[in-house]
Amino acid sequence: MSKLESSPESPLPLRRISQALAEWIGRLGEVWVEGQVAQFTQRPGVATYFLTLRDSDANISMQVTCNRTVLTEPLREGARVVLRARPDFYAERGSLSLRATEIRQVGIGELLARIERLRQLLASEGLFAAERKRRLPFLPQTIGLITGRASAAEKDVVENVRRRLPGARFEIENAATQGTNAVNEVIDALKRLDARPDVQVIVIARGGGSVEDLLPFSNEALLRAVVACRTPVVSAIGHEADQPLLDLVADLAASTPTDAAKRIVPDLAEEDGRIHEARHRLRQAIHRRLDHENQLIAGLPERLHRAVRGQITTGAQEIERARGRIRSRLDTQLQLAHAETAQLLARVISLSPQAVLDRGYAVVWDSEGALVRDAADTFDGEPLRVRVADGEFSVVVGADPEAG
């Protein structure tokens, strides 16, 4: 189809635009579409059924018509369907609708299979990993609560929290928790609460229900919105047997709304009891320590006397042993010194002139007192002095002993 030519001077009439849109849309032919029945209308005497089909993940809906022969039984609102339809553009009203020629309801088995495929996908991305779970605050400043308006789940959470912690603050966002609008309303409420700095934990709560009723809490768009939150999220959906995928991505999965209330705030009475018990144990421990110290102080003088006496005795014994070691060491040193002295004395004696004289030698001086070393240095009649081992005497050179 060629492009429509127009200008401010040559505008196209509205009917031409409507006809063009009808032609373009008509060329699409039949398509398979999936959605959720938001409204089903059956008018008496009319051979056509009227449906409002809504996208399960976006705020988009479209009118669908079908002949009575296409459906064997009426559809209930909230049902998941897959239909084959042709888009129709009504030029007179400027409206777009789908004319269905075949409608198939998605059974429970298929829904469960889709949930399992989504579970495997999210698990492979690590969105269920324990290390990405955030710890809940011990005393949240404000608790965000997403639940149905005036629902039993809201009452359970609020009453049980305030029973445990009187004065707890709530920021409650009421949203549809089943049906075609549930996913979008819960995501919007989640974003509003997550944007508030005073909200430190968010609880998504509703009572039990069928698989179809709980489908919004296994919706991929909602699950990824929970993962993107900066605030810890608690899942409290259904009863203990129910486990939507929200339980796996949430930071904490509570089995019921009542269980969620018990896990997001401490029990003030229990905590007060623990404080009193801890204080009692601490007081007992201090008393036991004081008693022990008193006993130690009471026996301190006697123990000190024994300790000092023992130290004195030990010191005296050490001194006596040291004295003995010193005396033994001195005796050894003196003996060694005596032996060395005797050796030195013997060497000195062996080297002294007296030792030479004792062996029979003599020392001779001339008249001038000089030692006589050579007989030629004397002359007859010269007086000499002679020293022997036991004394001295005088002699004359050349004198006859018998004549003297």
Image (cartoon, helix red, strand yellow):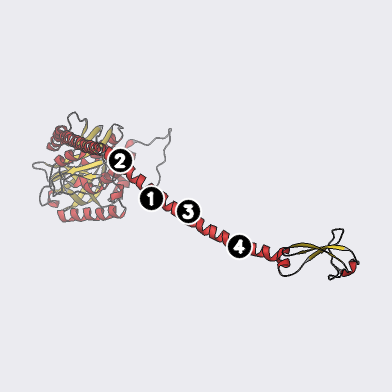
Residue 93 visible from this viewpoint? no
Q: Which of marks 4 and 3 is in front?
A: 4
How far is mark 2 from mark 4, CA to CA?
55 Å
> Type of residue at label 4?
Ala
Q: Quarter of the image holding residue 288?
A: top left
Q: Nearer the viewer, mark 2 or mark 4?
A: 4
- Residue hosting label 2: 305
Q: Do the residues labelled 2 and 3 touch (CB within 8 Å)?
A: no
Local crowd size for mark 4, using a 10 Å CA cut-off: few (<14), some (14–19), many (≥20) = few
How far is mark 2 from mark 3, CA to CA?
31 Å
> Type of residue at label 2?
His
- Residue hosting label 1: 317
Q: Nearer the viewer, mark 2 or mark 3?
A: 3
Question: Horizontal and vertical percent for residue 353?
Answer: 73, 63
| Disc nearer the start of the sequence (2/3) | 2
Residue 214 visible from this viewpoint? yes
Question: Horizontal and vertical percent for residue 154?
Answer: 15, 35
Q: Which of 25 and 73 is in front in this view?
A: 73
How far is mark 1 from mark 2, CA to CA?
18 Å
| Disc nearer the start of the sequence (4/3) | 3
Outermost residue, front direction? 403
How far is mark 4 from mark 3, CA to CA?
24 Å
| Disc nearer the start of the sequence (2/4) | 2
* Placement of 285 over or under 328, stated as above or below: above
Instruction: State the SS at label 4.
Output: helix
Question: Horizontal and vertical percent for residue 125?
Answer: 32, 53
Local crowd size for mark 1, using a 10 Å CA cut-off: few (<14), some (14–19), many (≥20) = few
